[in-house]
Amino acid sequence: MPRLRAGLIAAAILAAAPADARPRAAGQAAPAAITVDYGIALAGLPIGTAHLSGTFEGTKYRVDVSATLTGLVGAITGGQGSARSSGTIAAGPQPGAFSIATRTAQSGIAVRMALAHGNVTQAEVTPPLVDMDDRVPITPANKRGIMDPASALLMPAHAAGELTDPANCNRTLPVFDGATRFDVVLSYGETRAVEKPGYAGPVLVCNARYQAIAGHRPDRPGVRFMEENRDMSVWLAPVEGTRMLVPIRISVRTTIGTNIIEATRWVRSAAAAATPAMQGGVASLGR
């Protein structure tokens, strides 16, 4: 799971936001939708693909993310994963439901979380994590005011005016993936123009820092490497007709080369109707 999370799902339930049963008023805008296809490269070599689809209706959102390793890497590892999150948008995403499943040739893991206003009420990891004496314990406080890895890819503008205002880079994403709690601290780097299939215009280039909070093993070399990593960035592009920004490029230096996830197709459209996850509840974890 860590490799896929570092790719796009981390970069990856079951109680959605309450339904608004009122019919859409005449002239009211249809739900906005964004679909982005990504290519994944490591040290300059293509190793996989990823996909993000998001739907926004009023304050409600739903996002689906998937990633698959391909070519020789995929043949060896069998790596793939998918995640889904839904909830409401306030100052930031407040997930109500999150699930993720990842699989390699040797093993798989699944996480389901139910949340209320960004606070975890139930969580289930399958198979359960192995207890390690050196693992920093997860406390109840670590499960409050968080967002899941999929929701963290949706960034509502918190500065008035243009979506590409540099202030929209400056934020801290408090992420909990069911096993570890960490912060992703973003800061403004620059604004540049890009041209991709489906999108041409300015993007915010935000520098990123990783800060481990809990659930990690602090003496592990990988954890120390990520905390000291100064070569991470995310490029945010505005979603037309909304006050949202979505990654068009993510770059993370790893111990074996730079991992780049970059959009190959960007499609903004009006969703035909609210998705089931946005229309009401789903099964509880105890079901």
Image (cartoon, helix red, strand yellow):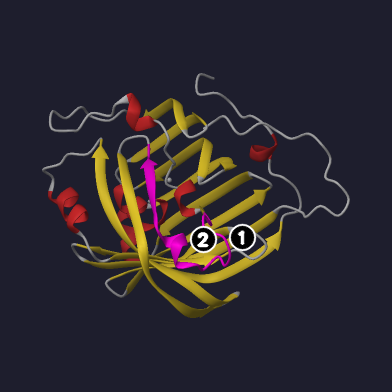
Element carrying mark 2? strand
Q: Earlier in the sequence, mark 1 or mark 2?
A: 1
Q: Quadrant of the C terminus?
A: top right
Write the residue at 42% across / 38% down: 146
Q: Which residue is mark 1?
A: 34
Disc 2 marks which amino acid? Answer: Val
Q: Name above or below for residue 156 compared with residue 117.
A: below
Write the residue at 20% across / 27% down: 131
Residue 102 on image: x %, y %: 39, 45
Q: Which residue is mark 2?
A: 246
Name the residue nearer the viewer: 283 or 209. Answer: 209
**Circle 2 crowding by C-alpha within 10 Å: few under 14, some 14–19, many from 20:** many
Residue 158 on image: x %, y %: 51, 55
The answer to whether mark 1 and mark 2 are in CB contact below 8 A is yes
Q: Quadrant of residue 215?
A: top left
Q: CA distance from mark 1 to mark 2?
A: 9 Å
Disc 1 marks which amino acid? Answer: Ile
* Segment colored magenta: 156-177
Name the residue nearer the viewer: 171 or 246. Answer: 171
Write the residue at 81% across / 36% down: 22
Name the residue nearer the viewer: 63 or 68. Answer: 63
Write the residue at 52% across / 44% down: 93
Name the residue nearer the viewer: 8 or 106. Answer: 8
